[in-house]
Image (tube, helix red, strand yellow):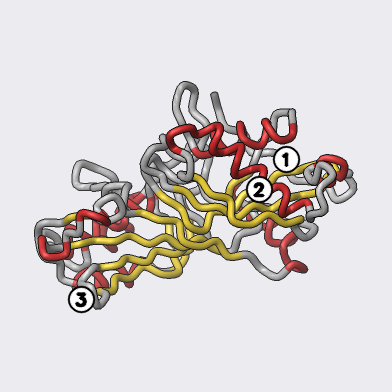
């Protein structure tokens, strides 16, 4: 089954666009996008919404995540009729958004069974005119935790932290990351989709070590290609170990090479932390511009 994005909502369509903010533990899921015979975040969310609204529901997501990748700040939208939105109260003296959150939590737990709590919707609001969870976004920010030494290997955080045996040189990794900032073709660091551009604006790519000794990577861009964050981090790890020079990432970027030396960092430490949108007045124009570039 090929995933298709819904068409842009027409302002006179008679529907309300609803924004949902959610987080999830990606460990038990085969990624965000629906896949036949597999448990996915999108599949669970849409099944729960269908239970509430008694019809098939399709959501549009800000950024599709791979299998095992987590999210704290994921955003989706869906379109409901005014009657459906008001009907969520079912006679109770509460706002529709409050009713939706309460009922959706119960429906998700029913759908997920033993995985109850792995997906949590934190907020539901009627979106401003022109809002599109995917195309209106200005940028997405990911984090990646690395424990580069057994003293930092905390068993309680093993599902969200990379246990790396070799010590990593923070200065070398940042020196390698800095030249990749800006508008570039990241073909060397992603799995391209047919007919889609691999040009992205990388806005942040940096490594910092916390007081707990954990190395935290921050990667932010207007959008990401498939596997782009894990490819960037995987390449930086080779530099941090001293196996590659600090100019290696830039050389591969310009050569547009993907080969056996391209390494994907493991998925489980990767977290979608935040998606940022412009002011309400600029949402429609941003979506129009991005849709033209990406499609």
The answer to whether the residues at label 2 and label 1 have Cβ atoms under 8 Å apart is no
What numbered label is drawn on residue 171?
3
The answer to whether the residues at label 1 and label 3 have Cβ atoms under 8 Å apart is no
Q: Quadrant of the N terminus?
A: top right
- Name the foreground residue: 6 vs 145: 145
Left or right: residue 45 versus residue 77 is left
- Name the foreground residue: 248 vs 89: 89
- In terms of sequence position, does the residue under pointer 2 or pointer 3 come before the other? 2
Left or right: residue 148 versus residue 93 is left
Q: Disc 1 marks which residue?
A: 7
Q: Is residue 107 above or below residue 234?
A: above
Residue at position x 36%, y 67% in the image: 205
Residue at position x 28%, y 74% in the image: 208
Q: Quick check: can you spot residue 81?
A: yes
Q: Disc 2 marks which residue?
A: 102
Whole-number angstrom distance, CA of label 2 to CA of label 3: 47 Å
- Name the foreground residue: 6 vs 92: 92
Left or right: residue 88 versus residue 71 is right
Q: Nearer the viewer, mark 2 or mark 3?
A: 2
Whole-number angstrom distance, CA of label 1 to CA of label 3: 45 Å
Q: Quadrant of the C terminus?
A: top right
- In terms of sequence position, does the residue under pointer 2 or pointer 1 come before the other? 1
């Amino acid at each position: 089954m090929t995933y298709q994005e819904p068409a842009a909502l027409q302002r006179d369509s008679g529907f309300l666009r609803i924004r949902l903010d959610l987080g999830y533990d990606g460990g038990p899921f085969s990624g965000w996008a629906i896949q036949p015979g597999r448990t996915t975040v999108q599949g669970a969310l849409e099944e729960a919404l269908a239970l509430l609204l008694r019809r098939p529901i399709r959501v549009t997501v800000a950024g599709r995540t791979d299998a095992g990748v987590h999210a704290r700040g994921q955003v989706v939208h869906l379109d409901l009729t005014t009657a459906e939105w008001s009907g969520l109260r079912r006679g109770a003296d509460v706002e529709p958004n409050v009713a939706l959150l309460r009922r959706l939590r119960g429906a998700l737990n029913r759908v997920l069974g033993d995985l109850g709590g792995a997906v949590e919707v934190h907020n539901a609001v009627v979106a401003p005119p022109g809002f599109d969870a995917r195309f209106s976004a200005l940028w997405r920010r990911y984090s990646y935790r690395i424990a580069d030494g057994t003293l930092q290997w905390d068993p309680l955080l093993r599902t969200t932290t990379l246990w790396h045996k070799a010590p990593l040189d923070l200065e070398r990794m940042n020196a390698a990351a800095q030249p990749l900032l800006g508008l570039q073709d990241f073909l060397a660091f992603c799995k391209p989709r047919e007919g889609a551009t691999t040009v992205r604006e990388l806005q942040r790519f940096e490594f910092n070590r916390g007081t707990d000794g954990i190395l935290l990577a921050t990667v932010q861009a207007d959008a990401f290609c498939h596997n782009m964050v894990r490819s960037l981090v995987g390449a930086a790890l080779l530099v941090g170990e001293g196996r590659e020079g600090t100019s290696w990432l830039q050389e591969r970027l310009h050569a547009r090479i993907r080969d056996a030396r391209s390494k994907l960092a493991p998925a489980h430490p990767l977290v979608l932390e935040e998606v940022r949108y412009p002011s309400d007045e600029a949402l429609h124009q941003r979506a129009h511009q991005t849709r033209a570039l990406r499609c």
